Amino acid sequence: MTDVSGSLMTEHGHHLSFLDRAATWVAWALAGTIFLTIGWFAMAPDDPLGAVSVLTRHGAWMMLLQAAGLAAVTAALATVIAGRRLPEVGTFAAAVGLAAVSLRGGTAGSLLIQWADAAPVSQSSLPMLLALEAMAWFVIVFMARGISIGVGHWCFGAYPEPRRDGSGGYAEGEPLSPRDGATHGIKHMLIAAGAALLTFKIISAGLSTRSVQHGQACFVVAASVCIGSYVAYWLVPVRSVLWAILSVPILAVGGYVWARLGPSPVSLPASVPASAFLRILPIQYIAVGTAAAVAMFWYLYHPVFESADQSHSSSSHASPEGRG
């Protein structure tokens, strides 16, 4: 199983032009505008002070369907605007839009307050309900990525792999090396998720008694995914962002399960979660995490593969001579 559609189309050391940069910023600004206006009407909680979550409003399924439609439209528009030079711009734009609309609502603390009066059994089931919601948001983001790839193929043709001869052009049909297979990708995904979980615990260690803030929550998720992706790309390099994106729901679900199985102190206020993993809304886990994974792929892809591909090519050319 390989996924070349997410490969970055710029050569190592070849920077985007001013027009390319302007197009990407327009795409991301458009994503924020769509979700902060139309998206807010579709996803706003029933309580004006509530958090953006399926648990805070009636008609949750309709909310998810509308969010999926907006994510698909946003990903498609962003791909048309800037997808020729940056194929994953649609995925990034949809994730940014979802993250932006979450900031307009309340924090995870407001969600915990809403559930404070629920029966103890309901309170204990909250982490698992949040885990299921996180998976629903991931399906939406993953669908938006599929739309982005489809629109990119339709508008620009098949996404080619970057040439490795330094010419600055593109070589279609170049075979991927064995390290791009599913086994390699799964290793990358698991390492990224594990490193992100560990980083999350370290970064959030001093937040246990503080109130929840949006900026704080988004920073912890973004930093955890970035560090997890960094570790995974250097230990098990891959040529697609797919595996880093797949590590994001593992972080979210793993965190909520950790919170469910961990101790539940009763001395904290209702707005302060017993576990640091409950400080993040499901939509923020997925949206911010996906955006961070894509951004790190853009940053790390060529520094990793420039040397790796050269050494791989050298060894493959040297081995027949040595045997001869």
Image (spheres, helix red, strand yellow):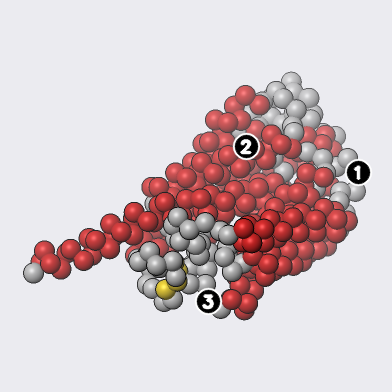
Q: Residues within 10 Å of mark 2 (few under 14, many from 20)?
A: many
- The x and y percentages for residue 134 are 68, 51
Which image quadrant for residue 213? top right
Q: Amino acid at mark 2?
A: Val
Among all residues in the image, which is located at the extreme front?
18
Q: Quadrant of the N terminus?
A: bottom left
Sequence-wise first label, 2 or 3: 3
Left-right relation of 69 to 276: right
Q: Is residue 177 visible?
A: yes
Can you name the residue that lies furthest to the top here?
267
Separation of marks 2 and 3 at Cα, in angstroms: 36 Å
First in sequence: mark 3 vs mark 1: 1
Q: Name the residue at 39% across, 56% down.
A: 305
Task: Give the mark toward the camera: 3 or 1.
Answer: 3
The residue type indicated by label 1 comes to Pro
Structural distance between the alpha carbons of marks 2 and 1: 26 Å
Q: Which quadrant of the rendered structure holds the C terminus?
A: bottom left
Work out whether 161 lies above or below 96.
below
Report how far apart the C-alphas of labels 3 and 1 lie in the structure: 45 Å
Which secondary structure, mark 3? loop
Q: Which residue is mark 1?
A: 48
Residue 61 shows up from this direction: no
Give the residue at mark 2.
220
Q: Which residue is mark 3?
A: 158
Q: x, y (%) of residue 153? A: 58, 76
Q: Badges 3 and 1: C-beta atoms under 8 Å apart?
A: no
